[in-house]
Amino acid sequence: MSSCERGLAPGISMRIDAARRVDLRAACPDPAGQRVAACHARRLGQQKGDGAVSDRDGSDSSGAGHATDTARDPRWQRVVARDRAADGSFWYSVRTTGVYCRPSCPSRVARPENVALHQTLADARATGARPCLRCRPDDATPQAARTALIAGVCRMIEAAERPPSLAMLSREVGLSPAHFQRVFKAATGVSPKAYAEAHRTARVQAALRERGTVTEALYTAGFASSGRFYDRSGAMLGMTPGRFRAGACAESLHFAIGHCTLGAILVASSAKGVAAILLGEQPEALVRELQDQFPHAELIGADSDYETHVAHIVGFVDAPNIGLDLPLDIRGTAFQRRVWAALQTIPPGARWSYADVARAIGAPRAVRAVAGACAANVLAVAIPCHRVVRTDGALSGYRWGVERKCALLDREAGT
Ligand SMILES: [Zn+2]
């Protein structure tokens, strides 16, 4: 197995042959090489005290069982086929000749009952056998060199900020892209792209666990935009990033994007009620705003039932005087809730100053904090923070733009 395979990121299936773990020992001598075998077997038996080794031709009572085991081992077929691709993944020793070989050794294939398969070179050496002069099992194989090369590529992919292109990687190792792709896949079982993807998934998962918000996590994981991240995240995480972050107890927010006279509008609801009404130019920006506002929630879009519900809210935003008869899911500190409750008492068309609101909540000196609470409101129009202006009547700021604030106030004043 290459170091590359050992370093695979979660999610990549590993091509580890379970049979490699089977440690078989040859027991029965081969009549064709019996003189050498008898001598060697005696030496082995003495050195290792291994009862499975016999120096008598074909008379070892345990031989039949071992022969069957070796013949059944999938690695044995690779020895019979002199499979070069198997070189470096296991070795075998032949009790009758007293040598150990690599799987592709060109020598005559021994009888399976005389063969022991070894997972490591050290295991093969430990039998006391000598390295074969024909296949030179101690030397690094082209396969091993290639494995080291691929392992280097894996480290390169892991260290890269963005997944490197196939062209870039193949140039790095001096192979054609198509050839490199084949070699990489033969060594790791996946394409370089799939390897990079799996590695990035692991990075995203780690970042989501460690970072404060989905947005921070996606930049940590090397995504240029949250749109691209959300395109990929379903496939990578098997769930939305929000739910992954929050674990199994994540709440769901349904959301939909529509258009109203003020531009794009995003409405999101929890089981309790409407949790966010956001206004803006770009629908994508509204989705990001929602993500940042509710980093722990699973955001569910494209629900046709919910979209009908949103039409109702769009109607309300366009004509606030009709009132909104939907429950709200208001989240905030105790102070923010007091401010927002006061804002909901301001009738359409009226304008309060921040000082008016501060007085209304019984905290006349908390004008600055009131302004902060107004800016933290995520329920546009439903909590009418647009009706709060500066003491001198200037419109002051608005989370969703002073122009929208102005339009809302004009509209309310005109009715
Ligand atoms: Zn050999």
Image (cartoon, rainbow, N blue to C red):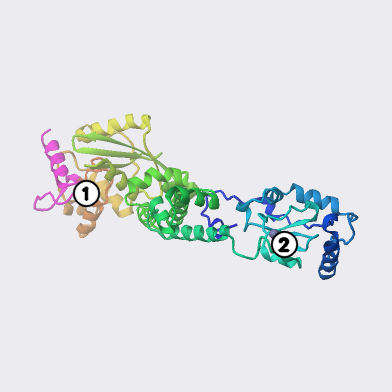
Magenta segment: does it hold 121? Answer: no
Q: Nearer the viewer, residue 9 or 154?
A: 154
User: Image quadrant of ligand 1?
Assistant: bottom right
Query: Disc 1 on helix, strand or loop?
Result: loop
Q: What residue is pinned by disc 2? A: 100
Residue placed at 52% from the left, 52% from the top?
Answer: 10
Q: Position of residue 288 (x, y in %)?
A: 31, 47
Q: Nearer the viewer, residue 327 or 306?
A: 306
Q: Position of residue 141 (x, y in %)?
A: 59, 60
Q: Amino acid at mark 1?
A: Arg
Q: Nearer the viewer, residue 361 or 304?
A: 304
Disc 2 C-beta below 8 A from ligand 1: yes
Q: Position of residue 292 (x, y in %)?
A: 33, 50
Rendered image: mark on residue 399: 1
Tell me the crowding category of disc 2: few under 14, some 14 to 19, or many 20 or more residues within 10 angstroms, Cα based: many
Q: Amino acid at mark 2?
A: Tyr
Q: Which residues are magenta?
A: 386-415
